[in-house]
Amino acid sequence: MSEIILALPVFFPIISGLAMLLCWSGREEWSRKRELLIEGLVITNSLLVAAALMGGVEGGRRLVVFRLYSVLTVMFKLDRMGSVFAGLVAFLWPLATLYSFEYMEHEKRKSTFFAFYTMTYGITMGIALAGNLVTLYLFYEMLTLVTLPLVLFPLTIEAVRAARTYLYYSIGGAAFAFLGMIFVLGFSGVGTSEFMAGGMLDMARAMENKQVLLFIYVLAFFGFGVKAALFPCYKWLPKAAVAPTPVTALLHAVAVVKSGAFAILRLTYFSYGTEFLRGTWAQWVVMAAALFTIAFGSTMAVREVHWKRRLAYSTVSNLSYILFGATVMSPLGLAAGLSHLVIHAFMKICAFFCAGAVMHKSGKTYIYELDGMGKKMPVTFGCLTVASLSLMGIPLFAGFISKWNLAGAAFEDGSVLSFAGVGVILYSALMTGIYMMTVLVRAYFPRRQDPDMTTGGASAGAASGLKVLAEENHVTDPSYKMLLPLLVFSAAILLIGLHPAPLMEFLTMIGGEAG
C-alpha cells in the first residue's frame, strides 16, 4: 500500500475543518445534514487510519512530507508504538463527535466549534504518526493552537482566564521540549532524526556530555509533561473544565494529555534510550515527580466538590501513572505505561461523558446536587459505575490490568523509589475509591428530603422546593447520541478487564523492542 496513506489521516481532517470555517463562517443555521457530513468525515478518517494499520507496521513504513534542512524532516512513520495511539484516537473520535451533537444542540457558533474539533483530530493523528522529534514537536505546538479556541469557546470570563492559563503553560512547556529536541538531534548517532527503538544518541559523544544531556532530558520531560499535567504544571487542566464537556473529555482523556504522555514515552524510549538514562539521577528526579503527582492529584480530587474539576484532578493523578511506567525505564515499564494510556482513555472519557450527560439534562455541576440522580438516569449512572470501578482498579475491570502491570514493573525494577511507587498507587486507589464512590452513593442512596420542602406547605421555601422537584422529575437519560458512546466505552472497559491478553501481548512486544 502506498505510503501516502500515512499522511491522509493527518491532513484530511485539517483540510476539512478549514473548509468548514471558510464555507460556514457567518452561516450559523444548523441542520441534520451538517451533522451527517461531519460524522461522515470523521468516520472516513478513522477508516483511513484502519487501512493504514491493516497495511502492517513491520519495517516501520515512512513518508517524508518535506525536508527542512539536513536531518530536519517532516516525516510520518507507522510503527507499533504509533499504531497504539493512532488506533485509540481513531476509535474514540467518531463516538465523541456523535456525543457532541446532542451536547451542543443549544449552543451558538456550532460551526466554529466542530471545525476546530475536526482539525484537532488530524493534528492528534500527526502526533501519533510522527516519525521523528521534529514532526512530533511541530504537531505538538499546533495542538495548542487548535485546541485554544475550544477552551475559549464559552467566551465567559472564566473561559478567557482558562484559555490564557492553558496558553501560557503550553508555551513554557514547548520551550523546554524544544531544548530537548535540539540536543537529541545534535547528539544523534544514526545520521537521521527518525525515532529508533533503544534511542538515537551517539553513545560515545553522549557519554562525554552525559550530565548536560541528563539535565536537558529532565527539562524536556517537564516540558512535554505540561500537557500531561505533571506537577507543578497541572493548573491549566482543572481550569479548562469550563469548556464544553466534549472538549474537556478530549483534553483529559484523548488528545492533549495523552499527547503529552505519548511524547514523553517517545523521548525516553525512542530518542534518549533507556540504556543512557537508567540508574541516573535524572531517572530518580522524573520518577519522584510522577509519584508525587499521582498522590497530589488524587488527594485534590477528594477535596474538590465541582464534578468536572474533580475528574480533572483525577486525570492529573492518572496521567502520571503513565509517566511512572515511563520512568521505570524497562520493557515492562513501557508496556505498563502504554496499557494505562489506552485503558485510562476509555475510563476517563466515559466518566466525563456521564458528567456531561447529567449537566446537559439537569444542569447539575456539583457533587452535592446529585442526590437521587441514579434513579432518574439509570443508564448514564450504570456506565459511570463501570468507569468508577475501573478507575479504582477493581479486578475484572480494565483499570485493574494497567495498575497490576505498573506494580509488576515496579517490583521487577527493585529500586527503593519503585517500591515506593507501589505504595503511592495503593494510596491513589484508596483516594479514587473515595472521590468516585461519593458520587455513586449520592446518586443511588440520596439523603432524605426536608419534610418542609416536600409536604406542599404554603411557605415560599416550600413552593420553591416543589418547583425544583417538579423540574427534576423530568430528568431522564439522554438520547442515543449520548448513550451509544457511553455503552461502547463501558463495554470496552469490561472486555479489556475480562480478556486483556491480546492487548498486553501487543504492548509487551513494543516494550521488548524499545526497552
Image: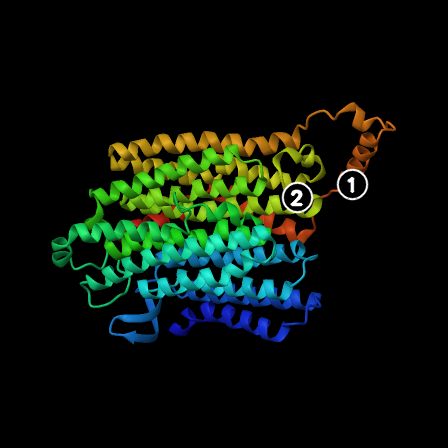
Q: Residue at x 39, y 63 (%)?
A: 129
The residue that mark 2 highlights is 358
Residue 180 image position (x, y, % from top left): 28, 57
Residue 330 horizontal side relative to residue 348, left or right: left
The residue carrying pointer 2 sits among few (fewer than 14), some (14 to 19) or many (20 or more) residues within 10 Å by Cα, namely many
Residue 93 image position (x, y, % from top left): 53, 58
Residue 163 image position (x, y, % from top left): 51, 55
Residue 15 horizontal side relative to residue 511, left or right: right
The residue carrying pointer 1 sits among few (fewer than 14), some (14 to 19) or many (20 or more) residues within 10 Å by Cα, namely few
Q: Residue at x 70, y 57 (%)?
A: 106
* Mark sitting earlier along the chain (2/1): 2
Kind of residue at badge 2:
Val
Asked if disc 2 and disc 1 are in contact, CB closer than 8 Å, the reply is no
Quadrant of image for the N terminus: bottom left
What number is the disc on residue 471? 1
Kind of residue at badge 1:
Glu
Residue 387 horizontal side relative to residue 261, left or right: right
Q: CA distance from mark 2 to mark 1?
A: 14 Å
* Colour setup of the view: rainbow
Residue 196 image position (x, y, % from top left): 26, 60
Residue 450 horizontal side relative to residue 379, left or right: right
Q: Residue at x 66, y 28 (%)?
A: 445
Res. 198 in view: no
What is the secondary structure assignment of the residue under circle 2? helix
> Number of callouts in the render?
2
Is residue 137 depicted above or below 443 in this figure? below
Instruction: State the image quarter where residue 386 is shown.
Output: top right
What number is the disc on residue 46? none
What is the secondary structure assignment of the residue under circle 1? helix
